[in-house]
Image: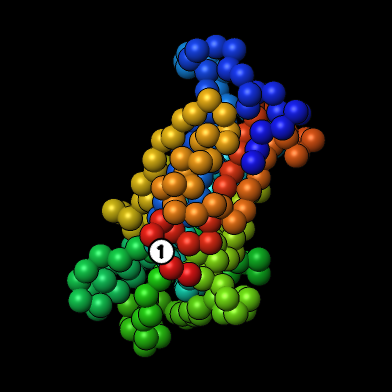
Amino acid sequence: MLASEDRPASHVLRRPDAGWFLSLYPSAGEAGGSFVSSLRRGGTGIRGAAVDPDRSRAEAARRAGVKVRRYCAANGLDRMGTLTYAGGGCHDPRQVRADVADFFRRLRTGLGGDPFPYLWVPEWHPGGHGLHLHYAMGQFVARSTLVDAWGRGFVHIKRFTNLPSRSGPLTRSRAAARYLSKYVSKSFDTAPGRERPAGLHRYEVAEGFQPRGIRLSGRSPDEVLAKASSVMGAQPSSLWWSGDSPSWEGPPAYWFAWDRPAGGVS
């Protein structure tokens, strides 16, 4: 249970339009939300972020990491791969994106034409070899098929296996997401020569596979948690509460995670 004496907001709502709100993503097995003091329009950013560029970048990287984790978890992306260039490499961010788009088009054709979920993020090679790509997939694909689809250099892919023996699909996919999120965070690097051209995304995903969220609300965090657990068919396996983080400066917030998606098996 979340309610306690040091969390008075969970007991009494002082305004009739206030409440606890939660965005639940059943296919990703996670949910996050916060207490809203009223439903009037207003800014939702963290105070001070706009005047602190470093803090703003850190918050943007955190939000991007959340989206990466949800996408990977919802689509079972537990195979990690890398695409690199032969020769002197590629130093043009736009060309890299055109090349990886061609790679996935050719791969889709080679696999029969049906769309499939994937996620990729570029990274500058620390040795000065230009850009290479990190990507995640869920289905098995023969390495020879990947090599034929890329055709510009080297291909690597592996499935996450160095996890506890009872780890289920969500655990493996979240591990892949953590790996990819490191490179998404690097995309916020503003070092000379590594700036991201305007209009280019930090990462790309296959269209049509975004996890769908469910909006829940209640008069207490326990009420919202009960609703989420009913949808998921179980209590969450992990829970985070902002009251346990002394450095938290936003409104009261919480995050839940399950070991399996709604109706799923581990």
- Residue 92 vs 152, above or below: the answer is above
Q: Local crowd at mark 1 within 10 Å, few (<14), some, or many (≥20)?
A: few
Nearer to the camera, 112 or 126: 112
- Residue 256 vs 149, above or below: the answer is above
Q: Identify the secondary structure beneath mark 1.
A: loop
Residue 140, by quadrant, is bottom left
Q: Is residue 110 left or right of residue 124?
A: left
Q: Residue at x 63, y 48 (%)?
A: 239
Q: Residue at x 29, y 53 (%)?
A: 208
- Residue 56 vs 128, above or below: the answer is above
Nearer to the camera, 167 or 109: 167
Q: Amino acid at mark 1?
A: Gly
Marker count (numbered): 1
Residue denoted by label 1:
264
Q: Is residue 224 left or right of residue 62?
A: left
Q: Position of residue 127 (x, y in %)?
A: 66, 69
Image quarter hosting the N terminus: top right
